[in-house]
């Protein structure tokens, strides 16, 4: 089972971060927190993650309208919210990958028609955000 939606673009990491934030905002998602994996690993583990995984940031995104509908349908879904969006760049490949959880993963965990509706809406929005990032890449 594939559990993410992703796009890989030929753009610098910082530019991909900016485009990702803007694309998510354009689809009604706010960024609750940012986890800078490299800095966290360095501070907590004393290791340089960039040596192993390259630049890596986890954006914890939330669309309040969708979250409200999902929690009204199944309060347990709070364990799956907010959705994580990863922006990562390999050490030497020159490309940046943006990936988000496939909302259909949430749908598969629930039999609720309301959750399916929320998952379908979130899927459309995340695909649109990823498309906007890809379409804004140089040479697109």
Image (cartoon, helix red, strand yellow):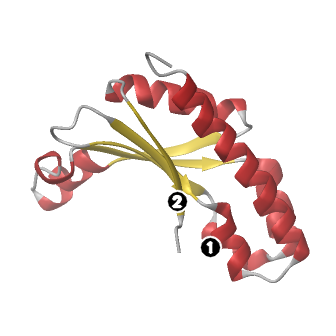
Q: Determine the secondary structure under disc 1.
A: helix
Relative depth, front residue between 75 and 121: 121
Q: Using the rendered image of the protein, determine whether residue 78 is visible from the camera's viewpoint.
A: no
Q: Hey, which quadrant is residue 127 in on the image? A: top right
Q: Is residue 70 left or right of residue 83?
A: right
Residue 129 position, x and y percent, is 63, 37
Q: Residues within 10 Å of mark 1 (few under 14, many from 20)?
A: few
| Residue sitting nearer the eye, 13 or 49 | 13
Please say if the residues under marks 1 and 2 sit with CB atoms less than 8 Å apart: no
Residue 92 image position (x, y, % from top left): 15, 38
Residue at which label 2 appears: 4
Identify whether 6 is placed above or below 24: below
Query: Residue 29 has which mark?
Result: none
The residue labelled by disc 1 is 79
**Residue at 50% across / 48% down in the picture?**
6
| Gap in angstroms between the C-alphas marked 1 and 2 | 18 Å
The spot of residue 39 in percent (x, y) is 23, 45
């Amino acid at each position: 089972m594939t559990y993410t939606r992703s796009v890989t673009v030929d753009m610098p990491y910082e530019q991909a971060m900016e485009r990702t934030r803007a694309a998510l905002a354009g689809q009604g998602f706010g960024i609750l927190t940012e986890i800078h994996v490299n800095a966290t690993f360095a501070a907590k583990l004393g290791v340089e993650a960039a040596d192993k995984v390259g630049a890596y940031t986890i954006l914890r995104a939330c669309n309040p309208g969708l979250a409200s509908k999902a929690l009204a349908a199944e309060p347990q879904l709070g364990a799956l919210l907010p959705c994580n969006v990863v922006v990562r760049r390999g050490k030497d490949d020159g490309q940046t990958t943006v990936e988000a959880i496939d909302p259909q993963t949430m749908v598969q965990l629930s039999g609720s028609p309301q959750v399916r509706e929320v998952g379908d809406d979130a899927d459309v929005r995340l695909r649109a955000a990823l498309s906007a990032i890809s379409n804004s890449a140089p040479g697109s």
